[in-house]
Image (tube, helix red, strand yellow):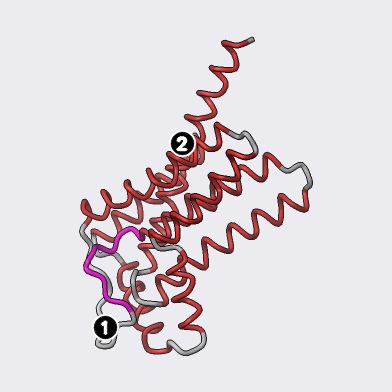
Amino acid sequence: MVLLFISGLVFHELAEAVMGQAAITVLDVRIADWFNAHAAEPFTTIMYLITYLHSVAGMLVLLGLLAWHLRRRGARYWLLALGFAVPGGMLLNVALKYYFQRARPVFEEPMVTLATYSFPSGHTTAATCFYGLMACYLVIARPAWSVRLGTVIFCLTMILLVAFSRVYLGAHYLSDVLAAMAESVAWLAVCITAISTLRRRREGKTL
């Protein structure tokens, strides 16, 4: 509940700042313009690869692989959490995009051209929900501290790389990806808490 409150508060503050055209929107434009002007190979190709791997199609593949692993391990409650967290988070993100209707960054020579809204970032939302859930599962399922630490570092790195790729390619502003991470953490907190409550109640009835 603490995590839900903090992440929800962060999202609220970012949304108010963006919609109110606060100072962060000036920083957004400066960062976006800088990356657009300084983009260079092979870094650009790497960013394209990262962002495409975490598109809707890429996320479906990753989702399927993790779902297969969870089913094979008999982790049915984690499988249920995965089914709610990632698709649900992506749908929530679409609803928020249409609510805020923020235009995407505009450049004379854009690296990507998208007709959808910008706030918050869909790629970052999907990545945060997916890797966030995977990190929670593996930290609990794997007793070795080295595995736990490695898992957290890997998952956090992937989330940050996806977020960075969206800003670098000019698909989103910095505030878009920060809001997406806050939104996703809040949503993950809701999903994991709900599934954990369901598990405890069902296991309590069987005792």
Kindly state the secondary structure of the residue where label 2 is placed. helix
Residue drawn at point x = 51 percent, y = 87 percent: 42
Asked if residue 128 is positioned above or below residue 193 in the image, the reply reads: below
Kindly state the secondary structure of the residue where label 1 is placed. loop
Residue 68: give x, y in percent of width and height.
Answer: 56, 45
Q: Main secondary structure of the magenta part?
A: loop
Q: Is residue 185 left or right of residue 72?
A: left
For label 1, the residue is 107
Say the numbered circle drawn on residue 14.
Answer: none
Say the numbered circle drawn on residue 191.
Answer: 2
Residue 28: give x, y in percent of width and height.
Answer: 34, 72
Q: Is residue 188 left or right of residue 146?
A: left
Q: Nearer the viewer, residue 27 or 197?
A: 197
Q: Are marks 1 and 2 in contact (CB under 8 Å)?
A: no
- Check if residue 66 falls in the magenta segment: no
In front: label 1 or label 2: 2
User: Which residues make up the magenta segment?
Assistant: 112-121
For the C terminus, the image quarter is top right
Residue 94: give x, y in percent of width and height.
Answer: 28, 52
Asked if residue 92 is positioned above or below residue 204 in the image, the reply reads: below
Residue drawn at point x = 35 percent, y = 52 percent: 13
Q: Nearer the viewer, residue 24 or 100?
A: 100
Q: Is residue 121 left or right of residue 130?
A: left
Q: Nearer the viewer, residue 80 or 109?
A: 80
